């Protein structure tokens, strides 16, 4: 090959390389090439600084959106670098144990092969999370279990009849359902779809503590307790005390702010009366108020005590607008969705990501609600502003004004560093503030 030929070949190769690194949009504009920024410079050991992401949705393991991957875990592992670059700290993963469907009816607790992926897939994902100094939250379904062949034959671990509450549905026909439950009566709300566990049982407590230790050894370091209305809060305290953890939150599904606060307070005392750090709660009260305030234009609802953070529980609050239960994706039995409109969703995230509490982004919103990528980009920019301004779970906020109606708005100052306005109404900020970001239905200013 001549020198000229080599030069020509090299030139063509360089052009192909450049073309492969950039992709032109339909408008003729070049899209930004993704470059790994490394571990987030905001990564730390303080959950009050965190932004959380729920990394699944209903039937996400079989959703066509991830059909190009062998499992949900494989899909998530490929997202970790981008999530780390977006400064997301805490990932809530689906129930890890083998069980029915999504895993909310766990069968073999100690078997971590599930419809979400194999145990090896899960291990690879957890190691990737740890490598970016992020945190993985395990979904703990401790209220109930299902049997292996019958309603009540528990395996991995195998438990006796005392593990099941005596007033569980499994007692109605022991010949059909297997072992007759013989434990203590249920101390909380019952769950008809599976066998309610007796948390007074020493074998149940020992088994669940062993399970937590297993999850911790695999790489989980945060806990999400499912359906905590099903058993007293003192057992959450007991299980938390058994294994060191980074963060803990319970699903106390209730829109009453005082009910949420009372449950959180009760998690400070174990079953044997010892004191332990309180567990956080998902702020359902704020979720429902945000829908009425932002979509119903009733902005004054955000004036007085709209959230756990407003009553001093910001570090014990996960703020959110939708999750796998309320989002109504791949299911027809829910009516709690915040919104389907992209602008309404973006406006709600503008509130969550500028206000106190630990904000949670729902993975389906982030990846798939807006296939153009605009919503994801908006959320990433809002996260970056939150991090740059040092806003956190215990930030202070002052409502400047809340005007109801279609031409109304909500305006508040957070930590005297950021001013946020939500709504289409005309609001003039005090002197000394300049716009740093605006979108449909919201504007942010800095000093």
Image (cartoon, helix red, strand yellow):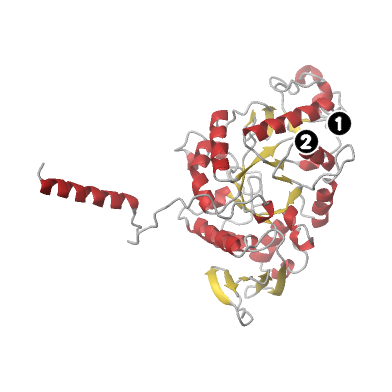
Mark 1 surroundings: few (<14), some (14-19) or many (≥20) residues within 10 A = some
Mark 2 surroundings: few (<14), some (14-19) or many (≥20) residues within 10 A = some
Instruction: Give the mark, 2 or 1, whose residue is nearer the N terminus.
Output: 1
Image quadrant in which you'd find residue 312: bottom right
How far from the left and from the top, in percent, is residue 398? 72, 71
**Residue found at the very far bottom of the displayed protein:** 431
Q: Nearer the viewer, residue 142 or 193?
A: 142
Residue identifier under label 2: 242
Which residue corresponds to the image point at 75% horizontal and 35% vertical from the top-left?
Answer: 142
How far from the left and from the top, in percent, is residue 424? 59, 73
How far from the left and from the top, in percent, is residue 267? 82, 45
Total labels drawn: 2
Which residue corresponds to the image point at 79% horizontal and 17% vertical from the top-left?
Answer: 175
- In the rendered image, is residue 367 in sight? no
**Residue found at the very far right of the displayed protein:** 273
Identify the secondary structure beneath mark 2: helix
How far from the left and from the top, in percent, is residue 78? 48, 42
The relative height of residue 184 versus residue 3 in the rendered view (above or below) is above
Which label number is shown at residue 200?
Answer: 1
Identify the secondary structure beneath mark 1: loop
Q: Quadrant of the N terminus?
A: top left
Q: Quadrant of the C terminus?
A: bottom right
Which residue corresponds to the image point at 82% horizontal and 21% vertical from the top-left?
Answer: 161
């Amino acid at each position: 090959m001549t020198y000229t030929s080599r030069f020509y070949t090299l030139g063509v190769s360089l052009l192909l390389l450049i073309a492969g690194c950039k992709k032109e949009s339909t408008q003729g504009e070049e899209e930004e090439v993704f470059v790994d920024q490394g571990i987030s410079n905001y990564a730390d050991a303080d959950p009050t600084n965190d932004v959380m992401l729920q990394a699944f949705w209903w039937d996400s393991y079989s959703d066509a959106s991830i059909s190009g991957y062998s499992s949900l875990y494989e899909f998530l592992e490929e997202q970790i670098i981008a999530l780390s670059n977006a400064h997301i700290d805490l990932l809530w993963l689906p129930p890890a144990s083998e069980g029915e469907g999504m895993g909310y009816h766990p069968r073999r607790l100690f078997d971590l092969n599930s419809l979400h992926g194999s145990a090896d897939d899960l291990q690879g994902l957890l190691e990737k999370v740890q490598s970016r100094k992020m945190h993985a939250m395990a979904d703990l379904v401790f209220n109930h279990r299902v049997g292996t062949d019958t309603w009540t034959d528990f395996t991995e671990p195998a438990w006796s009849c005392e593990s099941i509450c005596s007033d569980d549905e499994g007692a109605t026909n022991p010949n059909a359902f297997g072992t007759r439950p013989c434990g203590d009566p249920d101390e909380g709300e019952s769950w008809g779809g599976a066998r309610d566990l007796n948390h007074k049982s020493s074998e149940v407590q020992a088994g669940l503590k062993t399970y937590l230790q297993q999850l911790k050894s695999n790489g989980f370091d945060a806990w999400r307790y499912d359906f905590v209305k099903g058993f007293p809060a003192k057992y959450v305290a007991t299980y938390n005390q058994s294994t060191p953890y980074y963060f803990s939150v319970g699903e106390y599904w209730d829109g009453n702010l005082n009910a949420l606060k009372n449950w959180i307070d009760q998690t400070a005392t174990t079953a044997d009366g010892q004191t332990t750090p309180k567990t956080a709660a998902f702020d359902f009260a704020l979720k429902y108020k945000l829908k009425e305030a932002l979509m119903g234009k009733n902005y004054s609802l955000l004036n007085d005590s709209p959230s756990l953070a407003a009553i001093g529980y910001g570090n014990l609050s996960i703020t959110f607008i939708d999750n796998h239960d309320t989002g109504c994706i791949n299911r027809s039995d829910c009516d709690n969705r915040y919104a389907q409109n992209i602008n309404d969703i973006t406006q709600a995230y503008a509130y969550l990501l500028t206000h106190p509490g630990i904000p949670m982004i729902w993975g389906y919103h982030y990846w798939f609600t807006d296939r153009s990528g605009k919503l994801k980009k908006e959320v990433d920019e809002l996260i970056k502003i939150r991090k740059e301004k040092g806003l956190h779970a215990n930030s202070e906020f002052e409502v400047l004004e809340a005007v109801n109606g279609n031409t109304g708005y909500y305006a508040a100052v957070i930590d005297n560093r950021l001013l946020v306005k939500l709504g289409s109404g005309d609001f003039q900020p005090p002197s000394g503030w300049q716009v740093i970001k605006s979108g449909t239905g919201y504007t942010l200013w800095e000093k």
